[in-house]
Amino acid sequence: MKNTIAERIFDFLKDFPPFDVLNTAQLLEISTNIKVKYLEKGTVVFNQNEQPHFHFYIVKDGAIGLFRSMDDDEIFVDICDEGDIFGLRPLIQNDHYLMSAKATEESILYAIPVEILKEIIEVNDKVHKYIIASFSSNIKTPYANTKALFGNIDTLDSNNINLTDFQTAQYSKNPVTCSKNTSIQEAAQIMSAKRVGSILIIEEKNSIGIITDKDLRLKVATGIIPISEKVSTIMSSPVITVSKNITTAEAQIAMLKHKITHLCITKDGTPHSELIGIMSEHDIVVLQGNNPSGLIKELKRAKDITAVKYIREKTSNLLKSYMRQNIPIAFVAKIISEITDTITLKVIEFSLNEMETEPPVKFGWLALGSQGRKEQLLITDQDNALIFENVAAEDYNVTKNYFLKLAQKINNKLHLVGYENCPADMMASNPKWCLCLDEWKQQFDSWITQPSEKAIMMCTIFFDFNLVYGDKKLVNKLAKSIFKSIDSYEIFLNFLGKNALINPPPLGFFRQFLVEDNGENKDQFDLKARALMPLIDAARLLTLSHQLKNKNNTIERFEALILKEPQNKDLYFSCIDAFKILLRYRTNQGIKHNDSGRYIELNTLTKPEKLKLKGCFKPIKDIQELLNVRYNLSQML
């Protein structure tokens, strides 16, 4: 290669799919035919409904926002950044652009002639599979996971999937319809009045055809068909019908396969079944605009706290959607936790930018409790702490005051986003929980070697810390110190075990739920204290006893214990299953009642629901018996 620019393009493309599977000759041909485009912020690449260009695009630098226009509103759908391809689907399908694309910051694009890619697709099966998979999913490297795309969701790797693809696709339950004898003019007037882009032609409750805006443009506005003709003369027929349970991925595949933009939803999915709804490409676009990767991209590019709050609210909607679709709770927890951590990171970034100077020393922001365990699905109050490097005595006050001021900004912003302040002030803005490394070591050592009731309670909160931002070495040194303190005072584990048995198994002698005796939650069942916490406490204690580091999540702790104690694997597997069921149940309760989901009115439960909950209680009883025997706790209770 003598062309220096082509060489640079070649070196860039070879690291991104589908170019990374091309041979040298194919990639060189593309590289030498690429046009380089520099865009200032706000520059439009193409507009919605515009005819496709002769090129598709890959982002070299910067970011391109994709937007969908609807009812005079511009809806953000996604951000394309380095290595992302966009504008390809209309070229392959010979259709107009479904979205607008414009630079959200200074950007450099590579414009790639589609004809060259089409030639390569014909001879390169891997590229062909990539294009098909990328149209049917929102996965950035779909060819690497095409099998998983249609596999059993319980076996999916959450690091490589977009759960949006496995949700039941959204559709309109009130499709606009007319009879086959309706004139085109009347149908167009109905579509305009209802502000929709399609109308279904119905005969005896069955859909026999469809007219879209595209039909009106190509067949009527051009003068080919008079507007006075019946709709049957221009309708597309037969329609493609699917069932209401079709997933987003399946819907996209069906549209691509038949080169259509609408699907008819019928009772049993067949053409001869009653029409119950219609699904459009727009419905899928809206759903994908609320997917995890899209939300995280939005967060990373948010310019103010209002935008972060908006995304946090969208995350709550995403959670509701996942719960409705019965997505595996372990995956849901990972996704929501990742978004929560990204929200926290953005808030810390904003707060650091407001500080007059850079941090005087390295520090770390620690999430505690359920966020630290990556089990915070519902929006609850804050639990966090801050650790900073040791400093000379004369610099201590100035350094601590700096981090207290920073922590106050972070806590305030998290509150604005929607995370309530901790009623017990268990937050980094509290001087008690904003400490240097040596102070934290001394604090944990004190709790461990002088295990009072309060000290044990603090351990159950702070032992689940997780570094969200900052210096990992500080946290590693702290963890090492904690295990050293436990080694020097092994009876501490017995005290921790005693605490794990505070709440007895959730069923009484007559297999009745143990409910609260008094207070505002009298006669309600405490799902957190009586069911979830015994499992959380047991997993924490047992992993500490094995000195298993970097294991904060309850499910991951039990999975690690299975490897350490294969003789107890059946018990630990049952604990995992029980924890998943209880976590899902609490989340659904919280969504239903718009609260923490902690307390349950038993009279609102059906008998099957009660039986399912009771089925989770045996592992709790068994794990508590194991702790009782292992740590000889009967002598301490």
Image (tube, grey):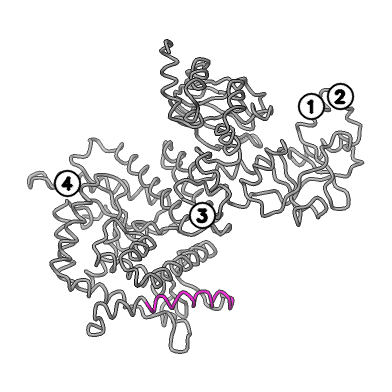
Q: Is residue 356 above or below residue 58?
A: below
Q: Quadrant of the N terminus?
A: top left
User: For residue 123, what is the image quadrant?
Assistant: top right
Farthest residue in the bottom direction? 510
> Which residue position is annotated with label 1?
218
Q: Quadrant of the C terminus?
A: bottom left
- Is residue 259 found inside the magenta-colored segment of the image? no
Magenta span: 606-622
Q: Are marks 1 and 2 in contact (CB under 8 Å)?
A: yes
> Which residue position is annotated with label 4?
389
Q: Nearer the viewer, residue 118 or 510?
A: 118
Instruction: Report the disc number at residue 319.
Output: 3
Q: Secondary structure at mark 1?
A: helix
Q: Are marks 3 and 1 in contact (CB under 8 Å)?
A: no
Measured as percent of width and height from the top left, residue 628 is found at: 29, 80
First of labels 3, 1 by sequence position? 1
Q: Is residue 349 above or below residue 451?
A: above
Measured as percent of width and height from the top left, residue 10 is found at: 44, 21
Instruction: Report the disc number at residue 224.
Output: 2
Query: Relative to residue 85, is residue 447 drawn left or right?
Result: left
Q: Nearer the viewer, residue 413 or 74?
A: 74
First of labels 4, 3 by sequence position? 3
First of labels 2, 4 by sequence position? 2
